[in-house]
Image (tube, rainbow, N blue to C red):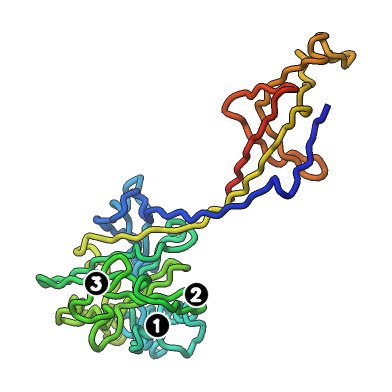
């Protein structure tokens, strides 16, 4: 009677599948309502960023969907940490943080579509929401200015490029005017602005979108006249300007993507195997003998569970069958076990 059976190499098959899902906790593909917390905005953290929720921040179901912030190379647009130290401010710290994370060089500058800019806005998605990475082509953000007819629809250019740019934070795609990863060519063939470069960059591997402030400030057809303020040692509250543009646009769609690796294990019980049981209804607990003569030559068992053991006989996984499978010398059983990780 076999209690254990060693698995062979061809009993294992590994498969990987890419799974995409909406990023938002509403479970809807498009987020249309946006909320901030007055408590968070008034705290010291509010000097750096605003957290955006899918419902009122005091509701039980409230969860942070993403944060918005503004960074400036020269520290403009916010108060200084110390009036005696020039340029050391909240916006300069934000600029330095993302420069180190994305560019990996404290002397580097951000370029958007080949045009160097000294400031930007950032949408930083909550880590647990985008899982492994952002799903390319799913980024669709509508920004709207306070004036009538000031609107721009942004997407990544993943479907328009054949060569992918890489940096310290992984893949880099340009943010352009368009939808579903393809440019709107009505104004420019590549979806960029005419003189200010692209609308930003998307870093899907770290869940970050960096928006070109100069492009959003344009007042012609290409921008939304966002009105970024760049005064020295002044709280210009630029974070709220981006939030207001997102809120007025009332449409933000983006999906997460993750790779699920599955290990398939094929457990084969041949006709001569696993036909006897140590169950008290089968074998005497005191003598170890088969209780019924008919079970000696014509045993019958029912497979209900598959246990997976390591080389020192430690039970490491258990698979429960949906129903018992009858087993005897005239039958063979094949059970497929799937492990997701």
Residue 76 placement: quadrant: bottom left
Q: Say which of marks 2 and 1 sits in front.
A: 2
Q: CA distance from mark 3 to mark 1?
A: 18 Å
Q: Earlier in the sequence, mark 3 or mark 1?
A: 1
Callout 3 secondary element = helix
The outermost residue toward the left is 148
Q: Position of residue 91 (x, y in %)?
A: 37, 79
Q: Earlier in the sequence, mark 2 or mark 3?
A: 2
Circle number at residue 250: none
Residue at the spot x=41%, y=88% of the render? 109
Asked if 70 appears above or below 19 in the picture, the reply is below
Circle number at residue 241: 3
The residue nearer to you, when weighing 295 against 208, is 295
Circle number at residue 92: 1
Characterize the local packing of mark 1: few (<14), some (14-19) or many (20 or more) Cα atoms within 10 angstroms. Answer: many
The residue to which callout 2 is attached is 169
């Amino acid at each position: 009677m076999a209690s254990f059976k060693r698995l062979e190499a061809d009993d294992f098959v590994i498969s990987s599948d890419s799974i995409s899902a909406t990023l938002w906790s509403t479970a809807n593909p498009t987020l249309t309502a946006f909320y901030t917390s007055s408590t968070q905005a008034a705290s010291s953290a509010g000097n750096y960023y605003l957290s955006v929720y899918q419902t009122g921040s005091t509701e039980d179901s409230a969860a942070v969907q993403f944060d918005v912030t503004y960074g400036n190379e020269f520290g403009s647009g916010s108060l200084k940490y110390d009036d005696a130290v020039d340029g050391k401010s909240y916006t300069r710290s934000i600029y330095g943080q993302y420069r180190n994370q994305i560019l990996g060089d404290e002397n580097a500058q951000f370029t958007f579509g080949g045009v160097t800019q000294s400031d930007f806005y950032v949408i930083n998605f909550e880590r647990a929401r985008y899982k492994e990475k952002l799903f390319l082509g799913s980024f669709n953000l509508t920004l709207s200015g306070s004036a009538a007819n000031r609107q721009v629809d942004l997407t990544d250019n993943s479907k328009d490029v054949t060569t992918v740019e890489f940096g310290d934070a992984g893949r880099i795609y340009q943010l352009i005017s368009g939808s579903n990863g393809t440019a709107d060519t009505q104004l420019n063939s590549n979806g960029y602005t005419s003189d200010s470069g692209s609308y930003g960059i998307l870093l899907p591997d770290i869940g970050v979108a960096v928006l070109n402030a100069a492009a959003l400030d344009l007042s012609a057809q290409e921008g939304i006249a966002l009105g970024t303020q760049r005064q020295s040692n002044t709280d210009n509250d630029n974070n709220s300007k981006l939030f207001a543009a997102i809120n007025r646009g009332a449409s933000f769609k983006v999906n997460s993507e993750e790779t699920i690796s599955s290990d398939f294990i094929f457990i084969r019980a041949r006709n001569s195997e696993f036909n006897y049981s140590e169950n008290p209804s089968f074998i005497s607990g005191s003598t170890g003998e088969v209780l019924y003569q008919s079970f000696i030559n014509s045993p019958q068992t029912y497979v209900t569970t598959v246990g997976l053991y390591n080389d020192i006989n430690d039970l490491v996984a258990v698979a429960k069958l949906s129903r018992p499978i009858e087993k005897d010398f005239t039958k063979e059983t094949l059970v497929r076990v799937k492990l997701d990780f």
